[in-house]
Image (cartoon, rainbow, N blue to C red):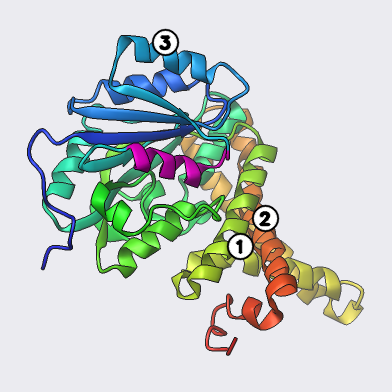
Amino acid sequence: MSRPSGAGSGTDDDLVTVAIPVRNEARTIERCLDSVLNQTYRNLQVIVVDGESTDDTQQVVKRIIADDPRVELLVNPKRIVPSSLNLALAEARGVWWVRNDGHSTIPPDYVERAVAHLRTGRWGGVGGRKDAVADTDTGRAVAAALGSPFGVGNSTYHHGTEEQVVDHIPFGTYPIDVLRELGGWDEDMVTNQDYEFDYRVRASGRELLFDPAMRIDWRCPATIKGFFRQYRRYGRGKVNTLVRHPESGAVRHYVAPALIAGLVLGVLLLPFRRLRVLALAPFAAYGAAVVAVSALTARTVRGLTARVTLPAAFAAMHIGWGLGFWQEWFRVGRDDGWTAALRLLPGLRSLRR
């Protein structure tokens, strides 16, 4: 396989730039930075980009900077992740790029493993397994839903166990000249910007590697309401990605919107007595699936409250994503025309603009 431009160069002591976008992460940023600064790979430039936090995040980071000059602090008045990443990219001096979040930690060999993969020249990006962690009962239910194929479909980085080529990696690591060649992150993408960027990496002829040994402990939402809101944002963000790249959609991206469509159809059919069984079918089928999968998943979850919260966690994920998808889809139809909106759906992409 020929080596893509910008990959596979460098030496054993290449500088690695670690970018960490944060906002109001005072409770977790020290733990995050400890995991980064204690890597077996020592030659690091660590750029924390703060989105104008209203808590003590900046003060905590400045205290750490006083003890370790590898850490730098930037402030992002736009307060969104893609612009924070682009600010860090503009200041990056490294050969390789590693992303982490202020509420996530990585194992000591994370950077070393990433750089070893990237140096081969085969990969446009490398990512690890994103394991949700939590301290509360509700948080543990959310974490279990995120680790379930029923919850996230074939999203390998949530539950994969073998190295493989994938379509998307979490908190990706890349050759920095690839990031610059592709223009960094789209700042109009408030969410789903990582998937959109990975699509451009793949469209450039490069491949993405998933390595489950590169484990990321990611602190997930601690409430069902917060989890629902997060996945509603994700659903809206997916539509924005499809607007740019209609062909990037995968089956898993449409399952939750299809669920919402089925439930709405059921509600519309309820007044018709002869169709009532058909109307109730999507509710019964989804409810049975949630109960059955929750019962199986509960065996791996600690705490009675967490176990009984599992159905709500699954429903928050699926309904949040589905509602967010349709909410943004209707906005596209209203603002850009219904032909443009229909092109975002499977089987209708050949419609003329």
Considering the whole magenta stretch, tell me its main secondary structure: helix
As rendered, which of 300 and 195 lies closer to the eye? 195
257 in relation to 50, above or below: below
Camera sees residue 60? yes
Would you identify the image quadrant in which residue 30 lies?
Answer: top left
Q: Which element carries disc 1, helix, strand or loop?
A: helix
Mark 2 closeness class: few <14, some 14–19, many ≥20 residues within 10 Å: some
Question: Of marks 3 and 2, which one's residue comes earlier in the chain?
Answer: 3
Amino acid at circle 1: Ala
Instruction: Please identify the quadrant where the C terminus is shown.
Output: bottom right
The residue lying at 27 percent from left, 53 percent from top is 125
Question: Of marks 1 and 2, which one's residue comes earlier in the chain?
Answer: 1
Residue assigned mark 2: 319
Report how far apart the C-alphas of labels 1 and 2 lie in the structure: 7 Å
The residue lying at 34 percent from left, 37 percent from top is 91
* Contact between labelled residues 3 and 1, with CB atoms less than 8 Å apart: no
339 in relation to 13, above or below: below
In the drawing, does residue 192 fall left or right of residue 8?
A: right
Residue assigned mark 1: 256
Would you identify the image quadrant in which residue 137 lies?
Answer: top right
Which contiguous range is marked in magenta? 78-91
Report how far apart the C-alphas of labels 1 and 3 lie in the structure: 44 Å
* Contact between labelled residues 2 and 3, with CB atoms less than 8 Å apart: no
Residue assigned mark 3: 63
Instruction: Please identify the quadrant where the N terminus is shown.
Output: bottom left
